[in-house]
Amino acid sequence: MHTEGLSRVWAVGLALGLTFGLAVGLVGCGDHSSGAVTGLPDFSGLVQANNASVVNVTAVLPLTALPDDPGAPNPSTPHAPNSNNPLEQFFQQFFGFNGGSSGNEKRPDAQGDAQGNSQGDAQGEAPPATEAPTEPENNSGSGFIIDASGDILTNAHVIEGASQVFVRLSDGREYKARVVGRDAGGDIALLKIDAKNLKPVRLGNSDRVLPGQWAVAIGSPFGFDHSVTAGVISAVGRALPDEADQRYVPFLQTDVAINPGSSGGPLFNVQGEVIGINAQIFTESGGYDGLSFAIPINYAMGIVQQLKTHGSVSRGFLGVQVQSLTRDMAAAMGIDRVHGALVTGFVAGSPAEKSSLQPGDIITAVNGKPINESADLPQQVGLLPPGSVVSLTVFNEGKTQTIKIPLAPLPKDDSRHIQSMKSDDLIVDNYGLLLTQSGAEVQVKAIEPDGPAARAGLAVKDVLLSLNQRPIDSLNSAQTAFLGAHANIPNAVLIRRGTEQQFVALSLTED
């Protein structure tokens, strides 16, 4: 049904083209003054002009050795986060780390042959776990030539773990490629081949890409070389919630059909210029579901320059943990609209931790560029080199100020200790409380939604006076009082809210 509907749309476009004699080729498709669409383009000229610039990339993966003890853990398996760490648990529950993981983003790496068969028998069954592979496995993707000297761009994940990389050109020539550099954070790899008569692509300006513009992809989905798909730009500056290692990439979102094997291929505009590198799909089925993502070419070429010069990529590091604002949180913070990145914590020893930033600050701009949601912040900061001074526009308690912070190099080790506070805050994680000290008073700074403190009716800015008759006048006394709190029965907490004092019953268990 859906397919028939699309066919009808294309038939009408063709009829209009024949009736009104629309010129085929790379033409504009709309009247920008009125927004009216007047025709559909013919991409055949674009494809013919660029086919020779698109290549197939094959990464040969080394044989995987079987452990002596089948029950022994695989040393290459990443360690899971320490779920028993109270601080990590508190942050996961309290601040949500910019939203939960959807698990739906997929890197469209090719698996199997051109018909999409899996690496098993005719019924698709996996080989027995005790059988060692007899031949190296291959990972296949796409790429494109950016320089006549043999420079080729692809995704870093296409060649991840490869012992050898081969590039096949459109005329059938195949070359062993040298990996000049690879950046996992940007998902960019730069390859080099020694070949003649190469035709590089023309690079466009991805900063000028707008939602609604046409886009064309050429690649090798499922091993079908030089397949062409087309669609429109759906959005720009997208962050993928399940890709923490690529939080610095402002993805272009499209509805161009991308599938396994398309990774690393070029995304063109209607002028035949590359505006992005196809990298990811958002899927619930495992295949293309209508959402694909490309790395902007301007961003990619900045990485290429660093890879050529240094062989690696350096990014600026601020070290602040943030979350996006909800409508209720914006109202609670006194900001007039839902925008900006709400500061919730800091990496210990980071530039942000050493600055005047505080939890509760809302970062609304970086170097004058607006921050609409929390994902915009690492994208902006990650574009800046270490040592540069970033200017943050910060809103707090009805006032806007500018804070300038020199950036450090992004640490290579991701195991960083996150702290929610500077020296004047205290987490009471089992009750879902964040407390701060103001003079001789201890105030509630934040409350975990649906946690024990929220169920008891505590609110932000409440002043805690005592817990089970133990006076509270400092964070130290608050910590001592909560350590001695009842676990199985309610605790009597005396608070002051405005000019009124009252007791609330704080319990770890629900009624």
Image (cartoon, rainbow, N blue to C red):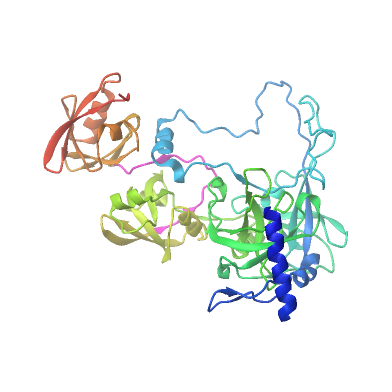
Whether residue 358 is visible, yes or no, is: no
User: What x and y, as percent, mark residue 82?
Assistant: 49, 31
Residue 373 visible in image:
yes
Q: Residue at x 56, y 65 (%)?
A: 211
Q: At which x and y percent is residue 104?
A: 59, 44
Is 334 positioned to the left or the right of 194 in the image?
left
Up-down relation of residue 220 to residue 78 (above or below): below
Is 399 within the magenta? no
The picture places residue 95, in percent across and down from the top left corner, at 40, 42
Residue at the spot 29% in from the left edge and 40% down from the top edge: 425
Displayed quadrant of residue 308: bottom right
Is 428 on the left or on the right of 225, as rendered? left
Q: Position of residue 290 (x, y in %)?
A: 63, 53
Q: How many marks?
A: 0
Q: Nearer the viewer, residue 94 or 193?
A: 94
In the image, taking residue 59 as reference, residue 295 lies left or right, namely: left
8 in relation to 108, above or below: below
Judge by depth and name the residue closer to the eye, 39 or 24. Answer: 39
**Is 307 situated above or below 483?**
below
Residue lying at the far left in this picture: please name it: 499
Q: Tell me: residue 203, above or below residue 450.
A: below
The residue segment tinted magenta is: 405-423
* Among the 4 quarters of the image, the one containing residue 135: top right
Q: Quadrant of residue 50?
A: bottom right
